[in-house]
Amino acid sequence: ADSDEAFDMWFTVKNAGGYADSVWAKLRLDYPGDSALVSIIDSTSYIGDLDSAGFHNEIPAYTTLTGESDPFRVYIKPGVINEKDIVFKYEIGTKNGSSETGNFYLTVQNGEELKGILDSTFTLTPDKLWLVNQSFKIIESGKLIIKPGTHLKIDKRFVIKGEIEGHGTRDSMIYIQGPEIFEGPNVIPASFKYTKFYDFEHRWEGSQNFDHCIFEDFRVNHMFYASDYLAIDCQFREVNVESVFKYGGGTLIRCNFDNINSYQSNMYGGLIIQSTATAKFNNFINRYSPASAMSSSNFSENNFVTGSNNVVYFAYRHAPSIDTITHQYWGTTDTDKIDDLIWDFWEDPEYPIMIYKPFLTSPSDSAHGMVWKVLLNGIDPHDEYLDPIGSEKLRFDVYFNKCMDTSFIPMLTFGVRDPLTQHIVEDSASWSSDSTIWTAYYDIGLETGDGMNYIRIANAVDTAGFKIPTDNSMRFSFNIQVASSTSIQFLATPGIGKVYLEWPFNYTEDFLGYNMYRFTQIDSVTYSDTLVINSELIQDSVFTDFNVIPDSTYYYCYKIVGTDLKECDYSKVISAIPLSTANGDANGDLSVSVLDITCIISYILEDDPQPFLFEAADVNYDGNINVLDLMLVVQMILNQKNIPLSYNDIIPEYIKLSPESVYLESKGQITAFQFEIFGDFTKSQRLFCNTDGFELVYSVQNNRIIGIMFSYINNPFPIGDLELIKFYPLVKSVYWGQIIASGRIGNPVPLKTSREPQVNSIQSELFCSPNPFSEYIRIQFVMPSNSVYEFVVYDQNGMIVLRKNGYQGQKGKISILWNGISGKSKRLSAGVYFGSLEIMDFQTNKILSKESKKLILMK
């Protein structure tokens, strides 16, 4: 709002799904004394009805109404000082409801324009905002005086041939804002003290004197061009220069140059100082463009501390063949680094050789306060090698170039990325006796995080009241490797179908557990996601990964979890290749024995044996683990010769199921059979083997029993009608699930049951081709009439990655074409997967057929 202005105001309100009848608002001044400055002409505003359903004013729910049709009217009286805040109190309510109150404020701007020709003395005062929007000139007889606290905004460049003077104070600075600026040719230098110039986009010409001034956010071609220029105790911050910052004569004494950037990166553009300028006791800090001088004698005791290896000084092209730039501080005592900071004959023979020795080994204390060195545990990481930091109390010693005001505490932080303030260093902080070194400590731990960290220092003030430039140059860095250092002894030992992992135990107070992560290399440049492989938090410092494929490379790392449930960084990465084993060695103990029989039986009974090598247990390579593989292992243990598989002389055998028993019309071919029986079983259900020389193992799961009956010496069942198994107690109804019978050499023997529809034998109709596959695999099977199917693909972790189902009214063939894409539209990684087919009667939901296949996805 402007002084001597009347204007309208109104509120915008929003309903929250409920009806509001006759919404109104009132306005008054919060401070009665402001009535001398502001007059509220109309203090009430009617907004209207808000309806949740939109029936009254046809406003949908959660929309808005405004009081624009009946606004408040406010008048700001003349003479209100610039930047005056006026506080208003409002009340908003409804016809029959409660009201709400609150405050807001308006800032009054009392502006006045400068225009035309000034031929006498004129003073700008802080009670107004002064604007230059039209042509304005100060002629030889004119003088413009700017008082402390005054704001001047220049939108159109004006000319000075007379005088201009702006003398602010430390506590009441003058503010001059661009984008335009004033220019000479003035004979009497423009004089400014404690003035801040900002947001300029044009160069400055003419004679200028600056004392304790701030120049910020300039975007210019030549900032000061051919000027008789004097700057003492000034600060230049965030200045972007297309060509030359300072060209021609001039003097820079005790100034700070902070982040002076160049649009051009070569020697012809972006120079801070060029030609005959004099520069003494200045700080050039953080990022800045290089400097150059016609006579290096004009440069004395300047401090160059960029933290980078960019050139900071160009030799002057037209200087003698050998020139000097001595008694400067280059941010280091390493002469190789200093050589890289100077562009001279050795980069381009057109330039002179610059002699920079002797140089300052510490920065000039005639310049304003700045940070020149940080020691970490007594080591300067800028010039010395610092070992990676582990879990320890780290000491920070911050060195300043001069005595500092100890009432101001430095803000020392570090981090791995901007703004470098992730960690604050403040423990046990103290100043040295001469107030030039500030010391503090930080406890580095797992929660700190690993990686290259960079130090940032701010807020320190020297005894002259000059605040240091915030040092975010990244010249002070150190490498934290807590997680990696604590995992130096992280080891992976490959086993048969497994990997043993062990590491040093963490003894910190906030330790909760570990998470183990794993990834694989897909090709020469691509890696899989890094995924956690433990199902629950690991409490010990050992872990065994059983979910592996032999002869494949796996990469492991772990994270420590704290009591705040946050994880530290990854440990070091190690790799292992699980070993393969002989066919039949299901448990991976490097031998085929009865233990492998037990392991396979446990798997068939749907337990979770660990370890279990699927490839080794799949002795007949059909992609399934069943009684056929079991009997082949028995044959191996008995050292029986494996005769060629020939089924021409095999005839079907009949097996019968009743609520009391299982009967077999044996032809002397079957040595073992695997069965699945459904019925009204309870957990107390018992099965008894009724045939000598055979073993019976089974598992009762709800209304389902899975079992195996076999001979350890691979003998077949005797010829004749046999009662193989008895049920106790008797059950009311039972029916077959899947049945698989094996001969002496692990060959399938067809079984027929007395129940229709008959359950599929091992000679299933499930067909998968090509297998292995890389792009597509076709899954085909035959379904009876009035049936439903479900085809599920599992990964090696047992997670479902694909599910297909459907209904078949008439008997027919089903064909599914799968491209290796999961149900979540994600391309699966190469490996072994398992497809499971289940066909059920549509009306009874009884399982008619159940089959599985191993699917191998290649890349």
Image: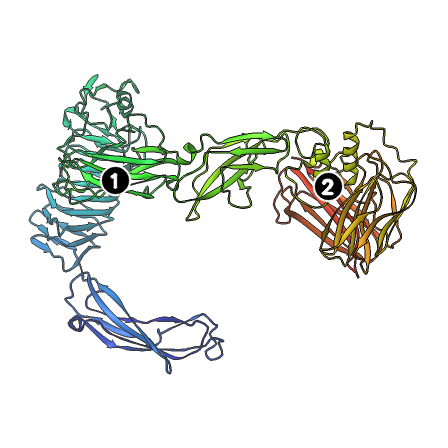
Picture coordinates of residue 514 (x, y %)?
48, 41
Out of 609 and 225, give the one closest to the viewer.
609
Out of 810 and 478, give the one closest to the viewer.
478
CA separation, marks 1 and 2?
68 Å
Secondary element at tag 1: strand
Q: Which mark is residue 365?
A: none
Residue 716 location, quadrant = top right
Out of 748 and 520, give the one closest to the viewer.
748
Q: On the image, numbered disc 1 is attached to which residue?
A: 457
Please determine whether, in this image, residue 3 is positioned above or below residue 196: below
Please determine whether, in this image, residue 53 is positioned above or below residue 225: below
Quadrant including the C terminus: top right
Picture coordinates of residue 330 (x, y %)?
23, 27
Badge 2 amino acid: Ile
Q: Count all numbered tags in the image, as a single digit.
A: 2
Q: Is residue 710 left or right of residue 54?
A: right
Q: On the image, numbered disc 2 is attached to which residue?
A: 601
Residue 692 location, quadrant = top right
